[in-house]
Amino acid sequence: MAGLYVIIAGAGKVGWNLARELLERGDEVTVIEQDRRRYLTVEQELEHAVQYGDATELWVLERAGIQRADLVVAVTGDDEDNLLICQVAKEKYLCERIIARCNNPRNLTHFKLLGIQPAVSATDLILRLIEHEVPSYGLVHLLDLPEERLEIIELVVGDGCAAAGKRVADLALPDGALVISVLRDGSGFVPKSDSVVEAGDEVLVVLDPGLEEDITNLFVANGASG
Amino acid sequence: MFVLVVGAGRVGSSVATSALRAGHTVSVLDEDPLSHERLDVELGKSWEEAGGRFTIGTALELDALIESGIEDADVFIASTNGDNTNLVVTQLAQRRFEVPKVIARVLDPRRAAWYAEQGVHTICPTQIAIDQLEQAALETA
């Protein structure tokens, strides 16, 4: 397959790494970064494949050659910017393929309303992974919750807390909370119901807003202070 | 009429206070509680005392928009200090809430012109300044 010409708006962690991968694959890439210092850092590695400018401005997109782009990927940290970059790419420059990053899952509805698809939300991706990896967890119930009512938090399991040494099945998590990942000794796994949570583990929990205190009491506080 | 102004900087607060003085129902949404003071100062008394509504919130939050009364608005004005925010929130007002009259302030002339072609009513202060400067310069030349 002939290489693509890809314009990436935003040279943050996502944009930079994406550019690297695409360049290694043999695609042609232009990254646009509006922060001068970040641009200079990234430019040391990517050289002419990164340009300095505000990708929401039409002339900046044109300078990057948007007219011949096969794909525009907007991965800045600002959802409004990502929305408008993709909207202009699609509707003004008739770019056939766009991908937008949605930082705040609450804004996904705006991307849909304005026809900016696909909009990728990390929260959403992790939810899909849960569906794939651990269907036995009452997951249907979780996915029934509207996206914007979910949070994912990371915490370190405290010494002597209620959760330490227990199997996931015995954790007595409140409804609307789920352990989706356990990191131990540098490697991570998706816990099964008989996986044991140990003090010092880093766990990712997906939960309804408002349950943070219950989760903290379970995973962090020791018996005395809880 | 019910006028909703999002972004109470110099422009937004002036439009809001004159709409209120003209007898309209006016609601203001701004993320900075301090912008409320600008409204008070312009009126010489408290904004609420004069009959205005004020909501603290971010323009893209649906809850904040609804709390500020977007569902009943006849006129929607996006005058935050960000072109991108104004262009997105204006399209939300138009397409999601179907506000009859929707206006966005956009500083970037090229995008103001393109979005105007797409059916978004844009006002571009930069273009107005350019036109007036050119006119003034040519007149004196």
Image (cartoon, coloured by chain):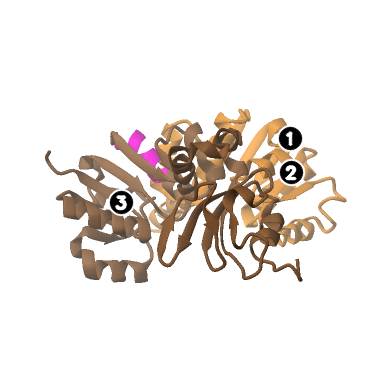
Residue drawn at 47 percent across, 38 percent down: A131
Q: Main secondary structure of the magenta part?
A: helix
Residue at disc 3, secondary structure: strand
Q: Is residue A89 magenta?
A: yes
Horizontal relation, residue A126 to residue A5: left or right: right
Residue A186 vertical placement versus A26 (above, below) = below
In the rendered structure, which amino acid carries the disc numbered 1? Phe
Residue drawn at 37 percent across, 60 percent down: A13
Report the front residue among A67 and B62: B62
| Residue B79 appears in the picture as rendered | no
Check whether the beta carbons of the residues at disc 1 and disc 2 lie within 8 A of each other. yes
Residue B101, percent from left and from top: 61, 31
Q: Is residue B80 magenta?
A: no
Name the residue that disc number 3 marks.
A8
Q: Which residues are magenta?
A: A84-94
Please report, as a chain letter, where disc 1 is located: B
Report the front residue among A17 and A39: A17
The CA span between labels 1 and 2 is 8 Å
Residue A29, percent from left and from top: 22, 52
Which hue is chain B drawn in?
A: orange
| Residue A114 appears in the picture as rendered | yes
Which hue is chain A drawn in?
A: brown
Please report, as a chain letter, where disc 3 is located: A
Q: Which mark is residue B2?
A: 1
Name the residue that disc number 2 marks.
B27
